[in-house]
Amino acid sequence: MSVKPRYDAVVIHYGEVTLKRGRRGYFERLLLRNLKKMTGVDVKRLQGRFVIELREDVNLDQLLENIGRVFGVVWYAPAIKAKNLDEFEEKLIEMLETVNPKSFKLDTRRSDKSFPMTSMEFSKMLGEKISSRLGLKVDLKNPEKTIIVEITEDGIYASHEKISGPGGLPIGVSGKVLALISGGIDSPVAAWFMMRRGCIVDSLHIYNLPSTDDVMNSKIPKIIEKLVKYCFRMRLYLLPFRIFWERCQEIPEKFRLIAYRAYMFKLADIISEKYHYLGIVSGDNLGQVASQTLQNMFAISAFTKNPVYRPLIGFDKQETTELAKKIGTYDISVIDYPEPCAILGRYHPKTDVKVEEIQRIWIEYDLEGVVEETLRELEIYEFKAGAERPIKL
């Protein structure tokens, strides 16, 4: 079992937010807020980075896992810290003795320009000292360990491992959207991608179960709970499939699935208008099934005033599956569940429905009335990270 160095801090780096010059301060403040909320500890803001000072009571593994769920973080690393050069040299010697590489390289970044040496001068000077004291080879081209040294206004930090963060933008910078969440693999991944672009995401689920109590005991809350780990809180809007199902028995079979999709998007559009969302998120990817051909997506979109975002449009199923495994929703999504789209997809749906055809179906079978009746059964639940159970609103 390998021994870990004695770390003093975790250094956290962000990337894309620095490109947004006009709003950099705003983005950094949101990222700082999100880090504090996710970790539950104090976070210090330095020039170009954040730092968490480690207390004895902090579980480092849990802390690193939590930081890895904060959008906007590009990479982070547990680090040693020293206030002066002599102290830093001793701590770095101790870290290298613990890690025990055959060769090393110092990669120094200096954000504190008042420091008397340049980055290259510091690396050369300290590298020679370390090599002499430990008998380690300095290898600038192919070192076994690269030590990242950061000279800041608050002290000197060093780390030997870079942990990749999720990247993207801090949640809250891009507005609020409503995601259509089924029990399948794709829709939770689509919601996650919108979070990664800085959106606050809530969800709408149309259930094919006898009651909302059955839904709340199904896999749907488990999917939401996985997503909430990345976004702190999420509303879940629940509406029944039953009312549409009773009406769709009269609709020609080849139009049933597309009529349902139009109905589903119409419900999402009305909720978006009422609760001030800036668009609807769907897990569609082009050409995967009949409901996701360009012609059918075009026809369905005619039933919404709000924009529809499809972050997975160019993904294949394998790519989406790998992402679902990464974010933790895959094992839940593959649990058997009565999906309305799966049921209606058995009726050999038409793949090239025209807007006029679906509008005619909509009027002829009074699907507007079905929408109104369905909305009368709306129930809303609030999920919060760390809460034992959701709250019914």
Image (cartoon, rainbow, N blue to C red):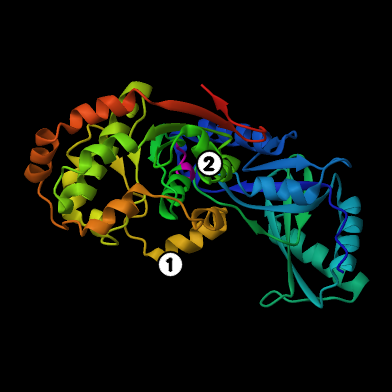
Residues packed near mark 1 inside 10 Å, few (<14), some (14 to 19) or many (20 plus) = few
Amino acid on which the number 2 mark rests in the picture: Ile
Residue 329 seen in the figure: yes
121 and 300: which is toward the camera: 300
Q: In this view, does 359 lie above or below 271?
A: below
| Quadrant where the N terminus is found in the figure | bottom right
Amino acid on which the number 1 mark rests in the picture: Gln
The residue range painted magenta reads 195-199
Residue tagged 1? 318
Callout 1: helix, strand or loop? Answer: helix
Residue drawn where x is 60% and y is 52% of the image: 165
Q: In this view, does 31 lie above or below 343?
A: above
Of mark 2 and mark 1, the one earlier in the sequence is 2
Residue drawn where x is 47% and y is 62% of the image: 321
Q: Is residue 369 left or right of residue 58?
A: left
Q: Main secondary structure of the magenta part?
A: loop
Residue tagged 2? 224
Query: What percent of the width, then of the height, locates residue 299?
Result: 16, 46
Q: Is residue 228 above or below residue 235?
A: below
